[in-house]
């Protein structure tokens, strides 16, 4: 059955899990993908690649960035999951969440704001709520000339900042959702 549990979590049976059951403080950063489970106490900053599991008995006071994150314990801090964030029924989270996909089991407690985006491929767009024409072009995967046409025709919501145009991602997303985008 052990193998099945790993497969359910998205881990292959040949992948290793680094299980940390200790009390730590500071910055923990993994530049290469790792499957990490924290079962103890941690305070500071946590930046991971790969899968991160916050165990049922874990007590975390940290801002967390990772790819695939599953939470069963307590977190006091903001969470940014590039792919997916799963909150198990025993999870208790106080902080803001930014993720592409979110799964919340019945019984989980979340006190904070949730921001969801479909794809986190352009980090400059994620870090900055405002975009210039080049960033918006990359975000929408549309030629910058087309964006200029939309702005000049008054179709696209933007603000002029001197000679530069800036666009709020939330307004652009609403504009797309409302179906105002025309090829």
Image (cartoon, rainbow, N blue to C red):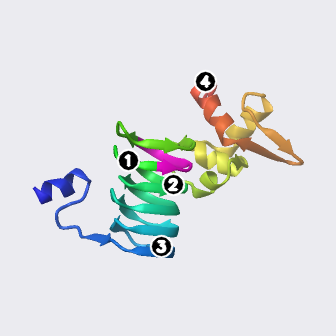
- Label 2: which secondary element: strand
User: In the picture, residue 11 is in which quadrant?
Assistant: bottom left
- Label 4: which secondary element: loop
Position of residue 114 measured from the top left corner of the image (x, y, whole percent): 54, 42
User: Of callouts 1 and 4, which one flags the residue occurring earlier in the amino acid sequence?
Assistant: 1
Which mark identifies residue 29? 3
Name the residue that disc number 2 marks: 80
Asked whether residue 101 is drawn in magenta, I would say yes
User: Which contiguous range is marked in magenta?
Assistant: 93-102
Q: Is residue 67 left or right of residue 94?
A: left
Q: CA distance from mark 2 to mark 1?
A: 12 Å
Question: CB of mark 1 within 8 Å of CB of mark 4?
Answer: no
User: In the picture, residue 19 is in which quadrant?
Assistant: bottom left
Q: CA distance from mark 3 to mark 4?
A: 40 Å
- Label 3: which secondary element: strand
Name the residue that disc number 4 marks: 178
Name the residue that disc number 1 marks: 86
Q: Is residue 167 left or right of residue 92?
A: right
Dot in front, 1 or 4: 1
Looking at the rendered image, the quarter that the N terminus falls into is bottom left
Q: CA distance from mark 1 to mark 3?
A: 21 Å
Identify the residue shown where x is 59% and y is 42%: 140
Disc 3: CA contacts within 10 A as few (<14), some (14-19) or many (>=20): some
User: Of callouts 1 and 3, which one flags the residue occurring earlier in the amino acid sequence?
Assistant: 3
Position of residue 158 measured from the top left corner of the image (x, y, whole percent): 77, 37
Question: With respect to residue 71, does 150 lie above or below?
Answer: above
In this view, the residue farthest toward the right is 162
């Amino acid at each position: 059955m052990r193998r099945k549990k790993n497969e359910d979590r998205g881990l292959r049976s040949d992948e290793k899990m680094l299980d940390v059951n200790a009390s730590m403080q500071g910055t923990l950063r993994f530049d290469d993908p790792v499957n990490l489970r924290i079962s103890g106490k941690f305070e500071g900053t946590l930046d991971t690649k790969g899968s991160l599991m916050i165990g049922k008995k874990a007590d975390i006071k940290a801002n967390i960035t990772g790819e695939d994150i599953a939470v069963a314990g307590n977190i006091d801090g903001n969470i940014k999951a590039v792919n997916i964030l799963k909150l198990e029924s025993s999870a208790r989270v106080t902080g803001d969440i930014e993720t592409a996909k979110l799964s919340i089991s019945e019984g989980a407690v979340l006190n904070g704001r949730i921001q969801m985006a479909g794809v986190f491929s352009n980090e400059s767009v994620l870090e900055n709520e405002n975009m210039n024409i080049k960033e918006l072009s990359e975000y929408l995967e549309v030629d910058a000339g087309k964006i200029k046409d939309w702005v000049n025709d008054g179709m696209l919501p933007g603000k002029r900042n001197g000679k530069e145009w800036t666009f709020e991602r939330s307004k652009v997303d609403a504009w797309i959702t409302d179906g105002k985008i025309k090829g």
